[in-house]
Amino acid sequence: MSIDIETARRVAHLARIRVEEGDLPALASEFNAILGFIEQLNEVDVDGVEPMTSVTPMRLKRRDDEVTAGGTPEKILSNAPDAREGFFAVPKVVE
């Protein structure tokens, strides 16, 4: 797949990145280099390779699920910019 200047312009627009007209050929070239690298990765044989979460085998740290002290809504809401009736108040975003 090859990225042309018009596609680079569209990607920049979708990403909300301002790119000058003179910089579009360089951007298209960078996109093509990235896609070329991805094509190289597609050639790697990964059959039988298990997915991993880290380069070293390890388990995620876990903690006991315990009920902790609560009942301090006043302390929790003390830093809220707007709190009403024991809840955080936020501006209405949907009409």
Image: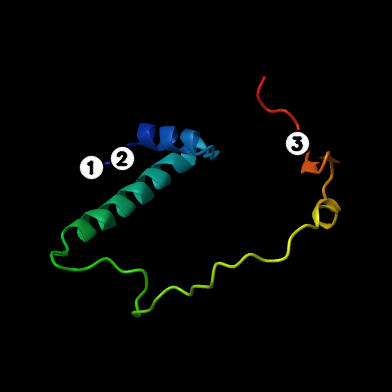
Q: Residue at x 43, y 34 (%)?
A: 9
**Residue identifier under label 1:** 1
Looking at the rendered structure, the kind of residue marked 2 is Ile
Residue 62, given in percent of the width and then of the height, sits at: 49, 73
Label 3 crowd (10 A; few <14 / some 14-19 / many >=20): few
- Mark 3 or 1: the one toward you: 3
**What amino acid does circle 1 point to?**
Met
| Spatial separation of the CA atoms under disc 2 and disc 1 | 7 Å
Q: Secondary structure at mark 3?
A: loop
Label 1 sits on a secondary structure element that is loop
Q: Which residue is mark 2?
A: 3
Relative placement, left or right, of 29 versus 36 is right
Q: Residue furthest top?
A: 95
Label number found at residue 17: none
Distance (Cα) linking label 3 and label 1 = 46 Å
Q: Nearer the viewer, residue 63 or 94?
A: 63
Task: Decide which of 46, 50 is in the foreground and name it.
Answer: 50
Q: Position of residue 94 (x, y in %)?
A: 65, 24
Give left or right: position of 9 versus 2.
Answer: right
The nearer-to-camera label among 2 and 3 is 3
Left or right position of 57 against 46: right
- Name the colour scheme: rainbow
Q: Residues within 10 Å of mark 2 (few under 14, many from 20)?
A: some
Count neighbours of disc 1 (C-alpha within 10 A) and say few if under 14, some if 14 to 19, many if 20 or more: few
- The quadrant of the rendering that contains the N terminus is top left
User: What residue did someone put label 3 on?
Assistant: 90
Q: Secondary structure at mark 2?
A: loop
